[in-house]
Image (cartoon, grey):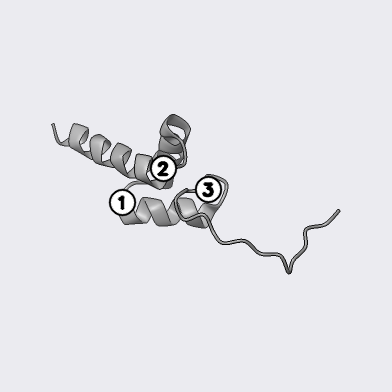
């Protein structure tokens, strides 16, 4: 059965959908990394924005050394 287009839920802003190009691109641009790096991080730590942000910070700190 087809989705009911009138029944809309709120967006889950706490997660980054790996399959949604615009979400990956936004997260990547916001944190100064590539979309490929973002997808790799999603595979590694999951799609929680909080965990991804911490992983980006750790990745950047590691690159500075």
Residue at x 33% of width, y 56% of height:
30
Query: Which of the two labelled residues, at mark 3 and mark 1, occupies the earlier sequence position?
Result: 3
Residue at x 53% of width, y 53% of height:
21
Q: Which of 13 and 21 is in front in this view?
A: 13
Residue denoted by label 2: 38
Residue at x 56% of width, y 62% of height:
10
The answer to whether the residue labelled 3 contacts the one labelled 1, judged by CB atoms less than 8 Å apart, is no
Q: Nearer the viewer, residue 11 or 22?
A: 11
The image position of residue 37, as x and y in percent, is 39, 40
Local secondary structure at mark 2: helix
Disc 3 packing (10 Å; few <14; some 14–19; many ≥20): some
Local secondary structure at mark 1: helix
Q: Nearer the viewer, residue 35 or 20?
A: 20
Outermost right residue: 1
Outermost left residue: 65
Disc 1 packing (10 Å; few <14; some 14–19; many ≥20): some
The answer to whether the residue labelled 1 contacts the one labelled 2, judged by CB atoms less than 8 Å apart, is yes
Residue at x 36% of width, y 45% of height:
50
Q: Nearer the viewer, residue 50 or 23?
A: 50
Is 46 placed above or below 10 here?
above
Disc 2 packing (10 Å; few <14; some 14–19; many ≥20): many
* Mark 3 vs mark 2, CA separation in Å: 11 Å
Local secondary structure at mark 3: loop
Query: Which of the two labelled residues, at mark 3 and mark 2, occupies the earlier sequence position?
Result: 3
Residue denoted by label 3: 17
The image position of residue 2, as x and y in percent, is 83, 57
Q: Which mark is residue 31?
A: 1
């Amino acid at each position: 059965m087809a989705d009911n287009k009138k029944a809309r839920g709120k967006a889950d802003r706490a997660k980054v959908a790996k399959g949604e190009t615009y979400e990956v691109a936004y997260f990547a641009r916001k944190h100064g990394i590539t979309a490929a790096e973002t997808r790799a991080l999603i595979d590694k730590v999951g799609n929680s924005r909080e965990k991804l942000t911490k992983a980006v910070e750790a990745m950047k700190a590691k690159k500075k050394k």
